[in-house]
Image: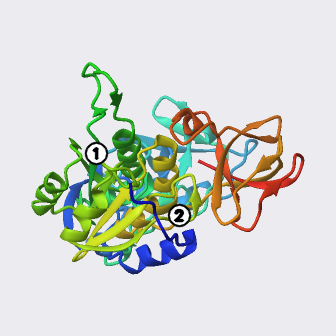
Amino acid sequence: MRPIKSLISIEEAKKIIDSRVVPVNRYEAVHLSEATGRVTAESVHSTLDIPPFDRAAMDGYAIIAQDSFGVSKQTTTRLHLFGKIHAGEVPGEKVSQGTCLQIATGAVMPEGADAVIMVEYTELEGNEVVLTKPVYPGENISRAGTDINKGALVLEAGTVLKPAHIGSLSAIGLDAVKTYVKPGVTVISTGDEVVPPPRELGGGQVYDVNSYTTASLLTQNGAEICLRGPCKDDPEAIVDLLKDEDADVVVFTGGSSVGERDILIDALESHGEVLFHGIAVKPGKPTLFATKGQQLIFGMPGYPASCLSNGYMLLVPVVRKMAHLPDLVKRTKDLPLGQRVVSSVGRHQLLTVTVEDNVAVPAFKESGAITSMSKADGYIEILSNVDLVDKGEIVKVTFF
């Protein structure tokens, strides 16, 4: 048993980690159907006008606007209807004074016409259209290039793709876009007692929780996940596993504490450079961070609540920065605390809470209870120099 002798603050831990994070600069072409949430690796310019032609913006009739001047419900005029234009067709007829063509929304404007009168302001009588309202030149027409001009910047490099961006790319004829490769994260559970579900449990064994919660959290924040393990409590086995591991980030869940079998520290000291082991935070003190070249290696606590809470604080910022994603915008709300909480001076505490009737009620049970997180709406932070937060005191709830 080797107790952790010195702890660093959570702020210092974040600074050390951030100083070693390098955004991924590899890129790949991704089909638009799979590109939402990805980050563009280059700027995109249009090679054509959008729309590529003058088109009708409404269902109605393509006319010469001057034919409608002075028209009202009391003073109507009639135009000769001599054909129809559907979307996707190229009109062969020309509109002349006193004539019109029926036209569908999105259809190419015919030569000679300079306006579309909506069908609501007309009456059809045989092959004549009665106009009951005037229109001005250009009314209800979408001109070529009014949405996107040829050569215009459509998306800048570094854009996080949303559905509307995908629409813009498809509008200019693309079916794929160059994006940064997602940072690769390998999640490895450790411990002779850890069993992947649904394998039957033996005596003293528990199901692997941390791999799945960590993988889910990091997938949600832009990582490409590989699950490995469980790995036995053997430093040589851990080192052998790491030798062929080329992921950008490796996350061990468990094995970072101080028991006889918590040997991750030994394996990582022989494999790379350990930058810290132990953070003054509750829960999650036995957290370890090491590097090998640009590869980042984390040893996360084995208790599920500790592992997941430190995942939010430490791992999420790492993968988002690597993935070129912006910092996560956290939703917060100031609420009264539902009961008195005693904290440990010297340790920054993250206390999970549920929100009931606009009151923050502590939800934390113990570090080993995943329901401390799964049933919580968010958490409050109790600073390291605070030992007591009283019932009714206003606290800032950060929502998951």
- Give how far across and how far down residue 204 sits, in percent: 34, 26
Q: Can residue 389 be seen in this snapshot?
A: yes
Q: Nearer the viewer, residue 257 or 23?
A: 257
- Give how far across and how far down residue 268 sits, in percent: 25, 65
User: Crowding at label 1, few (<14), some or many (≥20) Cα neighbours within 10 Å?
Assistant: many
Furthest-top residue in view?
A: 200
Q: Which residue is the site of mark 1?
A: 190
- Identify the secondary structure beneath mark 1: strand
What residue do we see at 35% from left, 61% from top? 298
Residue type, label 2: Gly
Residue type, label 1: Thr
Q: Is residue 19 left or right of residue 390?
A: left
Q: Is residue 188 left or right of residue 145?
A: left
Q: Can residue 248 be seen in this snapshot?
A: no
Q: Is residue 140 above or below residue 325?
A: above
What residue do we see at 61% from left, 54% from top? 68
* Residue 136 sits in quarter: bottom right
Q: Nearer the viewer, residue 279 or 393?
A: 279
Q: Is residue 259 above or below residue 193?
A: below
Q: Which residue is the site of mark 2?
A: 138
Residue at mark 2 to residue at mark 1: CA–CA distance: 70 Å
Where does the N terminus fall, quadrant-wise? bottom left
User: Crowding at label 2, few (<14), some or many (≥20) Cα neighbours within 10 Å?
Assistant: some
Circles 2 and 1, Cβ within 8 Å, touching? The answer is no
Lower position in the chain sequence, tag 2 or tag 1: 2
